[in-house]
């Protein structure tokens, strides 16, 4: 039976360290990390995420700047706000909550954020830096996965790592981070042939495909480490991951549950990026 990786516990430990680091920074330099979050429209899930980001700022002692804009906000108005925030020295991180309403051009909005304030790591400058391996910020979800693997003492070098999903937010950067740690990385996606066979070769399997209980026991090697990035609702409207936890956990050596695995890590990683950005923007080495 697999040991369960407790994301809540790891997240709480990281937050404790961040809180202390933030207090030290304020005391020694007077700098308080500031995070600006922009929400356009009233998508209910996005409202919850934005609220949780605000609460995390309060918990750690960050400045929180919240902008709730109407559904009808124009591209120009949004770009103007980003431009003002880019110039505000109290704002070290800027996050535009996705998805944006259809009439807004997501790409040009994300590209308008100053790369040094891009705490999502979505700007091409930061994406490129991750590819090269010389980066300051990492996208929150893959960074959270790496933190969980490290907290669990998982050795990555030389391991067969299979990532299911090739999104810009999770799959692609996740693969790069595993590669950087000398994993042998395979990226699978909707057109992959023999997906089950490839997954069954994985020592470390990271699943970010967005399909409830997609990975079943027959796709998992005995003793594999299984990381589930999915958040879905099952047929009974209960939260579930992309992995069929019930059948897979007896086979795995380590596994993340949903909820309580990768989920609790993401906002914590956003806070870590913001603190890092605050230090970098003030010439303070980490
Ligand atoms: N919406 C869902 N996940 C994310 C994320 O990681 N960043 C942003 N900006 N929006 C999101």
Image (cartoon, rainbow, N blue to C red):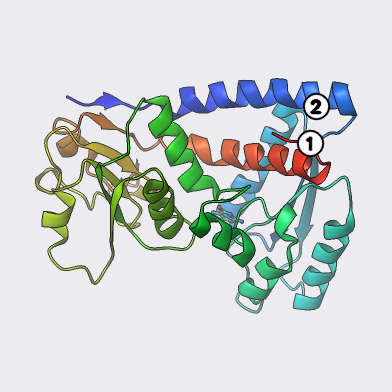
Q: Position of residue 248 (x, y in %)?
A: 17, 38
- Callout 1: 10 Å neighbours few (<14), some, many (20+)? few
Q: Earlier in the sequence, mark 1 or mark 2?
A: 2
Q: Position of residue 237 (x, y in %)?
A: 34, 47
* Badge 1 element: loop
Q: Which residue is mark 1?
A: 284
Residue 234's mark?
A: none
Q: Looking at the picture, does residue 60 appear above or below residue 144?
A: above
Q: Which residue is mark 2?
A: 25
Q: Looking at the picture, does residue 104 appear above or below residue 159?
A: below
Q: Closer to the camera, 113 or 235? A: 113
Say which residue appears at 52% left-offset and 28% top-offset.
11
- Callout 2: 10 Å neighbours few (<14), some, many (20+)? some
Asked whether the viewer can see residue 260, the reply is no
* Badge 2 element: helix
Say which residue appears at 40% left-offset and 36% top-offset.
259
Residue 205 as seen in the image, left or right of residue 29: left
Instruction: Using the rendered view, name the quadrant where residue 86 is placed.
Output: bottom right
Q: Is the residue at mark 1 in contact range of ligand 1, meaning its CB lies under 8 Å from it?
A: no
Number of labelled discs? 2
Quarter of the picture containing the C terminus is top right
Q: Looking at the picture, does residue 25 appear above or below residue 204?
A: above
Say which residue appears at 17% left-offset and 60% top-offset.
195
Q: Is the residue at mark 2 in contact range of ligand 1, meaning its CB lies under 8 Å from it?
A: no
Q: Position of residue 123 (x, y in %)?
A: 63, 63
User: For ligand 1, which image quadrant applies?
Assistant: bottom right
Say which residue appears at 9% left-offset and 46% top-offset.
218
Quarter of the picture containing the N terminus is top left
As measured in the structure, the alpha-carbon distance from the residue carrying label 1 to the one carrying label 2 is: 10 Å
Q: Residue furthest bottom?
A: 103
């Amino acid at each position: 039976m697999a040991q369960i990786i407790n994301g809540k516990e790891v997240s709480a430990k990281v937050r404790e360290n961040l809180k202390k680091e933030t207090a030290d920074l304020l005391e020694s330099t007077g700098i308080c990390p500031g995070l600006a979050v922009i929400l356009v429209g009233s998508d209910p899930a996005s409202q919850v995420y934005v609220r949780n980001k605000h609460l995390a700022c309060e918990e750690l002692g960050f400045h929180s700047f919240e902008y709730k804009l109407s559904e009808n906000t124009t591209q120009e108005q949004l770009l103007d706000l980003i431009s003002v925030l880019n110039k505000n020295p109290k704002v070290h991180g800027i996050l535009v909550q996705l998805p944006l309403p259809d009439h807004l051009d997501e790409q040009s909005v994300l590209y308008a954020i100053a790369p040094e304030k891009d705490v999502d790591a979505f700007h091409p400058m930061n994406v490129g830096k991750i590819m090269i391996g010389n980066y300051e910020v990492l996208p929150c979800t893959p960074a959270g996965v790496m933190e969980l693997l490290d907290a669990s003492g998982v050795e990555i070098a030389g391991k067969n790592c299979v990532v299911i999903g090739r999104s810009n937010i999770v799959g692609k950067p996740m693969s790069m981070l595993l590669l950087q740690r000398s994993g042998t990385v395979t990226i699978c996606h909707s057109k992959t042939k023999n997906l089950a066979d490839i997954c069954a070769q994985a020592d470390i399997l990271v699943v970010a495909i967005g399909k409830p209980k997609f990975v079943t026991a027959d796709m998992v090697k005995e003793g594999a480490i299984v990381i589930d990035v999915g958040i879905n609702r099952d047929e009974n409207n209960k939260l579930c991951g992309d992995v069929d936890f019930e059948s897979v956990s007896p086979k795995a050596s380590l596994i993340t549950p949903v909820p309580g695995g990768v989920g609790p890590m993401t906002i914590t990683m956003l806070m870590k990026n913001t603190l890092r950005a605050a230090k970098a923007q003030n010439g303070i080495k980490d």
